[in-house]
Image (cartoon, rainbow, N blue to C red):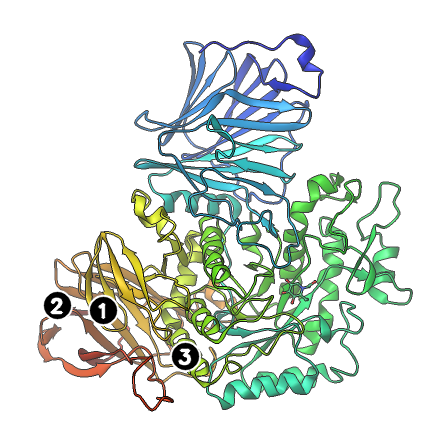
Amino acid sequence: MTHNLPDSNRKTSSSRYLPIGRIENWKKTADGFLASSEVAQLQITVVRGGIIRVQASRNTFFDPNPYSVVAPAESVDFSLEEIEDAIHLKTAEIQLQMELVNGICSFFDSTGSLLNKDDALGISWIGTEVTCYKELQANEKFIGLGEKTGNLNRSGRAYTNWNTDYFGYGINDDPLYASIPFYIGLLEEKAYGIYFDNTHKSVFNFGASTDRFSYFNAEDGDLDYYFIHQPTVAGIISSYADLTGKMKMPPKWALGYQQCRYSYYPDREVLTLANTFRDKNMPADVIYLDIHHMEEYKVFTFDGEKFADPKGLISRLKEKGFRVIVILDPGIKTEDGYIPYEEGKSQGLFVKYPDTQDYVAQVWPGYCAFPDFTNPATRKWWMEKMEFYTEAGVDGFWTDMNEPASWGQFTPNLIEFDYDGNTSSHRKARNIYGMQMAKSTHEGSLKNLPNQRPFVLTRSGFAGVQRFAALWTGDNVSTEEHMLAGVRLVNSLGLSGIPFSGYDLGGFAGEATQSLYARWMSIAAFSPLFRAHTMINSNDAEPWAFGEEVEEISRTYMNLRYKLLPTLYSSFRKSSQTGLPIAASLAIAYSNDPLVFLPAYQNQYLFCDSFLIAPVESFKEIMKVYLPEGDWYYFFTDQPLKGGKVIYQDCPLNNLPVYVKAGSILALQNTVPHTAAENDGILSIHLYAGNEGSEYIHYEDDGLSFDFESGEYYERIFRFSASDQKLSINEATGNFSSQFDKLRIYFHGFTTDTIILGDENISLEQKSFAFLDKLTEFDPLPDLNYPHLSIPKLKYLDIKLQSEKMEIAGLF
Ligand code: MIG
């Protein structure tokens, strides 16, 4: 199509659309090409075979975000030529074509089939605002974008990236606390990803109030995006994680149950809380100290009365198997004599007005200055300050209010941040602030606890935050719709490179009903982060605070979570290597199945690869579940189910709809009071018959240190081959000894009564088996509300776990 070039006055007018215009010249570089158009400079870089970066600037220099992308460009073979008025760049996986007449970019896969194309309005500016308009393609769907509300398919909506403290947000509100400007476009049978690497306020519009195009823009800075193509959605997420980094392996205790409230105090109440978990036989690993642990909310202090002996308290909690996490707020009270303030002020570590006066705003402690976490000197100082907590025995950190938040909720744009030597206003620095606080805190943990893997939980973040912290979805509300919206947020974070996230189980604002709490507990047991939290002045919200039925249902799911630790820990390991989520929206594995995107089924997700979870409101006793293609088992009874269909599922409060994919391998242990407690030495492998087979990479290490990086791990591949009717367990690798010495293999859905081990025929044992504990029958009418589901006559085999290769054959 022809393009009307703008008249020359547009080049200076700031209030009208200004397209990039004709490409006037271009030249090849070592990894791509540089071009200049009538109004801008362009740089195209081949980052990987499947990743091409497009930068456009109206300045004479490019202004990249130094914080998010960590992968250096690899040298990749590509060809570059000008044919028929377009520049053609090809790698083995992807092709870019840029029209000389108007700079319009089209991306194709290796077969030449179109993946994505700029709209005729292309790359353009309105004043400093830069936008890239993209053609909408037939049936195109959009997923990802991190912590964004709404439907799984983001078509028809627009989103803003501007980190915002949003107490009690509505389930369709935007923006929230964290910004991840990365999305995946789904075409029929093909997909691509776009990561827009600009920290300014940005907008992604997937066809809201227009059906002409989709677009993304930022209010200033470069157009700087990475176009990613891989044959699968999982491949695209992994490539994005190659770019922005992967979650580090967390300490094992962070996978346990975490109890929070705003706030537990004084110290004896914290002890009572810990004792109650143990007395009630409810497994738990973490207790949080929210802002009341401080003296007048001053960070790096303990309240002398409420917490007279923090060290003593924490060591008593540790004896009971609890780890303590403290909240860290960025605001530093501007109080003379308060050492962190004095230091920060004299060393120039705070965010400033352009006239060098410190910026102050009100938060909990009153007027506060804000450490400039984009300044390396501030980060170093913060890391050193954290010794105050590690000295007292604190093991984990919770970075809150780091959007940054202050009363008034409106930060003046002129304040300045170091931005690592490239002083920038709030407009550019806001979205990165929270991630830099998480980074400082992560590194502070490493500095002060050098032999421990850090655990940081952050509220705010930006692309790449997964390298430093897990993330929770802020101040949700105790409602049924919030419970489901939280699942979608976590799934969306997982699509966006952040595997470790969760929501406040039970809801932060408001009061959960009994049934809501019970259901939320069961869903959260299948969330990467398993944490209950509630707000100040709300009713008690511990798992025993809702009556004995809820307490028992909670306990069964908490126990199940701990039984699943071997699978869960192995999944975290895999995720730290691949960048793929632990809670995976069905849009990843079944991206071409339209039913997955229907609002009725969009909350469903795969957990640890083998489970399918169908979250459901607590008031429903029956629901519709969509099982994608393949064969499935209902987890609690082993009932086989055909996929590719919608089923009706009973879902009383004690039975969350959970399914297992046929052919899967699950690894369980007995339940333990906390993750570091010794188990009974039996690794239970649950093998599910199926045509597909599967592979499970079992992983163990000490759960705490970095020794695994130098070989102190135990890893082995369990492979079920359906066609060979075999389960093989490869030789163990690594120098760590397994915590297990016995293997119990449960055979789900198999007909045979005997198996072959080596050259021996062995008859299988049988027993009735249940994944969930039986609830007490409080009601004189037994089993009325809460049937206890079990698997009668489940076949199993007990053998010694050897470190040499093992093979079990004859499985049919
Ligand atoms: O202004 O520290 O989202 O989890 O309990 C509220 C008190 C500050 C907001 C966090 C919430 C936390 C609360 N904080």
537 relative to 209, above or below: below
Quarter of the image holding residue 574?
bottom left
Dot 1 alpha-carbon crowd within 10 angstroms: few under 14, some 14 to 19, many 20 or more = many
Q: How far apart are labels 1 and 3 at the CA level?
A: 26 Å
Residue drawn at (54%, 37%), measured in percent from left and top? Answer: 204
CB atoms at circles 1 and 2 under 8 Å apart? yes
- Of the two numbered discs 2 and 3 on the same chain, state the one appearing first in sequence: 3
Where residue 442 appears, as percent x and y from the top left, is 62, 60
The secondary element bearing badge 2 is classed as loop
- Of the two numbered discs 1 and 2 on the same chain, state the one appearing first in sequence: 1
Q: How far apart are labels 1 and 2 at the CA level?
A: 10 Å
Where residue 52 appears, as percent x and y from the top left, is 47, 31
Where residue 130 appears, as percent x and y from the top left, is 62, 28
Q: Which residue is mark 3?
A: 553
The secondary element bearing badge 1 is classed as strand
Q: How far apart are labels 2 and 3 at the CA level?
A: 35 Å
Q: Amino acid at mark 3?
A: Ile
- Label 3 lies in ligand 1 vicinity (Cβ under 8 Å): no
Residue drawn at (46%, 51%), measured in percent from left and top? Answer: 492
Report ligand 1 position as a quadrant.
bottom right
Q: How many marks?
A: 3
Front-most of residues 462 and 163: 163
Q: Amino acid at mark 2?
A: Leu
Front-most of residues 578 and 170: 170
- Label 2 lies in ligand 1 vicinity (Cβ under 8 Å): no
Which is more foreground, mark 2 or mark 3?
A: 3
Quarter of the image holding residue 661?
bottom left
Q: Is residue 807 left or right of residue 247?
A: left
Numbered mark located on residue 687 in the image: 1
